[in-house]
Structures are given as structure tokens and as C-alpha cells.
Amino acid sequence: MANIAIDSIKERTFDAIVIGSGASGGWAAKEFAEKGLKTLVLERGRDVKHIQDYPTTNLYPYELEHRGEMTYEDKQVNPIANRCYAYGEDTAHFFVKDDEHPYIQDKEFDWIRGYQVGGKSLLWARQTQRWSDHDFEGPARDGFAVDWPIRYRDIAPWYSYVERFVGIAGNSDGLATLPDGEFLPAYPLNAVEDHFRRSVDRHFSGRHIISARCAHLSQPQPVHLQQGRVQCQNRLLCRRGCPFGGYFSSNSSTLPWALKTGNLTLRPFSVVHSILYDQESGKATGVRVIDANTGGELEFYAKVIFVNASALNTNLILLNSTSGRFPDGLGNDSGLLGKYVAFHNYTAQITAQYDGLLQYRTDGRNPAGGGYIPNFRNVHRQETGFLRGWAAAVGAGRYERRSRDGVGHELKDGLLHATLGNWGIHSHMMAETIPKASNRVWLDAQKRDQWGVPLLHISVDYAEDDWQRRQDYYEQMTAMYEAAGFTNIRTKDTPRRPGNDVHEMGGVRMGHDPKTSLLNSWNQLHLCRNVYVTDGACMTSTATQNPTLTYMAFTARAVDHAVRELKRGDL
Amino acid sequence: MKFYMNRRSAVRTLLYIAGGSLMLPCCMRESGRASIALTNLSVSEADEQLLAELVEALIPATDTPGGRELLLHLFVLRMVDDCHGPAEQQVFTDGLAAFSGWSQKELGRPFAEAAPDKRTALLRRIGESGGTDIRQFFAVTKSRTIQGYLNSQYVMTNLIKYELVPGRYDGYAPADRPPAHG
């Protein structure tokens, strides 16, 4: 009997455990497995195998029973998921339904989740921009949150490392606020986006419109072909899963790469309950898992644990990892665990039209979506009444107008004979928000979910300065639109709840000091150094960039650190 | 004729693939019920046939198929049954019944038996029908018919071609080049 028990423990013992298989978890898996460590990836949802588990990927619009629309019943049952722009008849199977994992909204919060192998890397918007020192130095300069314990030079080589493998389309634009990377050819701006770019260059110093940088293979390199990925085919059906591997997901890229090493064990249906802590050694020893199929509890053990469960679930797991030493959650002597959660403010759009350049139209589809305006506010000095700033996406297109007037032959003719409209321009805001102690998550003292894990309270809200940033976006974009000769300029508030941006961050922030932060400069818990957090939970501030690229770079850097520490016997 | 039948059967097959549960062509039914399984709407075979005539009046067959052949009436029913709430469904079925009565009164015969030009003339006067139910029923039916038409396999493969795999993007394409769609 003793031998069986020992064998069983052996089978459940690995060098490294990674909690979560999304963009950052996938990177942890790849890096550990490549470096020869026996690695266990725990995924709470089902398996999704590249291509074979993309059931809608090749469907034509008329093959979707409701042409992509969600049913009335689904909208009643899943209002949270339905408010996400990416949720539809062709993608709903990759989203968590509202009752699948309940949480408590102390303030309205749309928690958008993808519980499956690959997580939300199947669903992401694929926009990838580097942070600059303007972003890393922000909290220290402007006196909010805490100082980031790293600077751009610390992460720059890891951005490069990740970008080469992921494949990022972009131009070298030479902007200090948005450092260049290892780029595949960019998707060029179209005629009116280009016109807008030239106009802004001419009329506004320090402002730039660049081709949006995105994780699409515009020109695959050998390392991408080795992953089994080929050139992006401009389908823009990405969120169904891409049979070409044209965009980066864990499913198409890091996970199969890790599996090929023979060092990866991928265990779906594994809901992590908590991290096990051994007071004597001062280390985490493993994780407690609830098998989602059987409801049974089991433990896995490893020398190092990476928490990549998605920002708020990472908070949840750490808060639930209590012990005699850490009664308030693992590494949480400071009481800051779960606090200073932040997000991106996406609640503004501005549209216009342009009556020139009618000799051009677009043909095909642009995976990058158009142009990107890096933040130009408060870069060199504080110049507005609010801190930090905003970035903007901008795209232009000509739409075919089809008359829907009348009935009979008039209607049929109208529908079949399109006229090309003038150019329309669209932009949306991506604004930084300032982390606050009052924006926080915590565990309910009594209520448990179906796996026996406490329910998460979420209390996160906008603040007055968010609306000041939005007003500035409207004013500056209007001025830039007018200078470009755009007309019919309309601003539009989009009343999205926090969380609906799907960029929730923080709660386990990085910093120099265990008294004011949870993680050190290598993403290790200050107080339990063999636990690393490299997903959105680690973020000290939010900047304006889409965050996934930064999580991936943090992850590769942290694994490199962990393996060096293990070799030295320091973990 | 053979081509016609093949195309027709292809459309029905497609509808089936798309998840509709089409059981039998209208003329072979004796149940008096609609030919697709509906969860919420109470629609008779006669209602369905009236709706088929209405979608045909909206989008008539020419040298290309019309609404009836493309089974747009079944698409309208599918969407109203699944994607509209109870209040809108009630307005739809009330409006359908009211439309049946109003059109019979105005045309002096059932809508289905009136000549095509009489039907279109009547539909142009829908605003004068008096009932808000009729107008709302008609607005939903027209909107869903247009959606079903533009997103039908026939239109997307023959008339306004949908590209699943464009494989290109050109931001400076000449505006006078025939459009590619997506």
C-alpha cells in the first residue's frame, strides 16, 4: 500500500505547475517544457484542440441558424456574456455562460471569461503594443499606485523574444512612446487612414497615426511554419479559431510546441482550489485541484508554481490559499491582495465621414483593423487636469449602400444594386485608469460555487478622472478630424461596464516593497518566492496599450528567472 | 425544370443543415401546422402560406429566385420564434392575423389569390392599414426577409458573392473595380 501511495504522489509531482492555459499560461508551458522541466498545465475548462475543435471556423453566414445573432432566451440567461462584442452564435462556445461560474457584483462588472484550453487567447483582439518608459515610470512620476520595480530595458529583450515567436505585423515607427519591435510586414493604412496620418503629422506635433500592430502572420517566418501556422488569409473570423493559425493563440502556437517536447502534461477540467504552502520550508509545495468532472479533490506538487488563471481568478486562487502563516491569502501580509484592480476605459467612440479620395475603396479585409494613435497626453510633462492619457484605434472604410425602400421589384432591385458610399471614419478610445485601493475583489465568507470555492466579490468602478480623459479624447479627436477635412463628426458614449473591456488588471501588483506590493521585479511573490504571477493580476498600472503582449513577455522573462533560480537551488 | 427542382431541394437541404427542422413540403402536409418546429409562435399552415406569399410579394421571383423559393418565410418564422421576446412575438402573430383580415377586405379576396401588382400596391399602403400591430408585423417581416435574402446561400454564392477566405487586403483599390464582398 505504501508503495502505491508513493507512486501516486510521484505521478502527481512535476518540476513546474502552470495554472491556466491562456496567452500567458501557454507561454509558461512552452518555456518550461523547452527548458526540459516536467511541466503540468492545469486548465479548469475543456480541451480545445487546434483546428479540430473549431466547429464554426468554416461556416458561411447562411450556415449559422440565426445568422450570428444570439437567441432571445440566451440574452435573458446570459446578459453578461451577451454584452461582450465578441460573443455571437459563431463564438458562444468559447465563452463562459453567466451561471457557469457565479460571482458577486458589489458594483456592476462584466467578467468576461473563456474557460477552455487556450482561454481567451482564442478570443482576443490581437492588438499588440509594447510599453515604454513613459508607462513604467508613470506611477512614480505622477504619484499613484507604487513604482514599477522594472523599466523598459528590463523587459525589452523579452518583448523581442516573444514577438519573434508569436509573429507581430507592424512598422518600425521610431516613436519613444511605443517602442518598435521584431516585426513582420505591417498591414498598410488605407487611402483615408493615410490621409488622416499625413494631416495629423502636418497639424499636430507629437501626435502620430501608425498601422495598428497585431499578432497576425503577414509573412510567416520559419519559426511560424515550424509551429504549423501559415499566412493569415484575411478572413477576420479569428474568434472562431483559425484553421491557418493566422493569428496567435495558445492552441495554435505555444501549447502544441510545448507538447512536442514531451515534457508537458495538460490536464483540462482541473479547477484550482488553492496553492499549498509549507510553513517549514517557507515555500509552496503544490496545488489543490477540484476535478470538474468528478468533483473529487486531488493535489499536485512541484518546485515552482506559475499562476496564470486570468487576472481575477489569479486573485481568487491566492485569496483562497490560506494557511496558518498566511490567513488572508498567500503572500498577503500587506493586506493589499485583491486591491488596486484597474482596467481600460473603452466607453467612447467618434465617427465622421470624408467626401474625398473617392477614386479608392478597400478590397479584402485588414486583420490589423486600421490605424493606432499612441497616447500623446502628459508624455513629457503633466499638461492636463487628469493624469496619464488615452490611445485610440482609428479605421476608415466605404460601405455599400443598398436601398431597402419599397416592396416587390423596387425592393429587390434596391437590395441587389449597391452604390458605394463615401468614406466613413471610426475611432474608439482606450484610456488608462488609475488603480485605487477601493477598486478591489475579495472572497465571500459563506457562499461557495459548485466546486466548493468561495464566490468572488467584485467592486470596481469608474472615477471622475475617467470622464475627463474621455472629454479630452472627444475634443482632441474632433480637432484632428476637422483638420483632416472630415465632416459629420459625432461622438458617442458607449456605456460599457468595467470588465467589458476584458482588460481587468492588478490585485497582485508588482513593486519594490512587500509592505506595498505582492510581487517583486521577477513576478515572484515577495513572501513565497516559488510562486510567480505573470498574468494581468501582476499589473501595477494599466497604461493604454492592449496588455496581452506584456503578459507574455513577463512570463517568458519570469520562467527564465525561475529556471536559473532552480538550477542554483534558490527556489 | 430539373434545375429548378434541384436548386429548390438544395435550398431545403441547406435549411436543414442550418438547423431548421423542415419536415415536409407544404402541399404534402395534413397537420395544419407550420412546417418547421416552433417553440413560441403559434402559426398554422394557412398562416405560413400567407407569409410565404408575403415574402414573395416583398422579393418576387424574376430571373432569380424570390422569397418563397428561398424559404424566407421560414427564416422569418425561425428568427421571430427564437430571437424576439414574447411581446414582439405576440405583436407578430396578432399582426399576421390582422394583416390577413385587412388584406382580404381591401383586395376582396385572400392575399394569396390576388394578382402580384394588386399585392404590391396594397403593401405600399401598409401605413394606412390602421393597426399598429399590422405595421409592426410588416416591419419585422420585411426586415427579417431582407436579412434572410441577403444572407441566403443563393444570393451569397450567385449574386453578391461572400468570400470566406479573401487572402488579401488592398487599402487603395480602384473604386471603379467590381467589388469583392466580405
Image (tube, coloured by chain):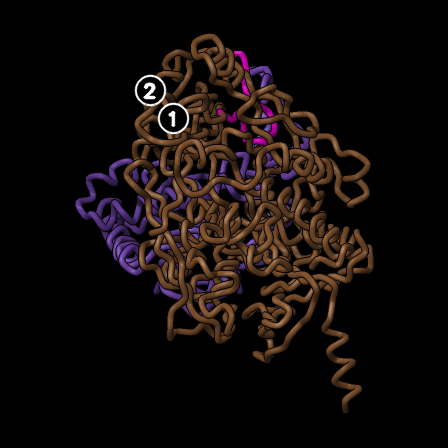
Q: Mark 1 sits on what residue?
A: A351
Point out the tag, 2 or 1, that comes first from the N-terminus: 1
**Would you say residue A247 sits in the magenta stretch?**
no
Q: Which chain is purple?
A: B
Q: Colour of chain A?
A: brown
**B73 relative position to A558: left or right:** left
For residue A421, say whether it is visible.
Answer: yes
**Element class at badge 1:** strand
> Could you tell me which residue is drawn at 52 percent across and 61 percent down?
A331
Task: Categorize mark 2 by other alpha carbons within 10 Å: few (<14), some (14-19), many (20+).
Answer: few
Q: Which residues are magenta?
A: A357-373
The single residue placed furthest to the top in the displayed view is: A202
Identified by mark 1, the residue type is Thr
Callout 1: chain: A
Callout 2: chain: A
**Residue A216: image x %, image y %?**
66, 36
**Residue B179: image x %, image y %?**
58, 24
Do badges 2 and 1 share one subunit? Answer: yes
Which dot marks residue A10?
none
**Residue A325: image x %, image y %?**
51, 70
**Element class at badge 2:** strand
Quadrant the N terminus of chain A occupies: bottom right
Q: Mark 2 sits on what residue?
A: A488
Asked if the residue at tag 1 contacts the one at tag 2, i.e. Cβ–Cβ closer than 8 Å, the answer is yes
Viewer-closest of A196 and A170: A170
Instruction: Name the quadrant containing residue A242.
Output: top right
> Could you tell me which residue is drawn at 38 percent across and 58 percent down?
A458
| Separation (CA) of disc 2 from disc 1 | 8 Å
Viewer-closest of B85 and A423: A423
Image height of A74 relative to A424, above or below? below
Identified by mark 2, the residue type is Asn
For residue B45, say whether it is visible.
Answer: no
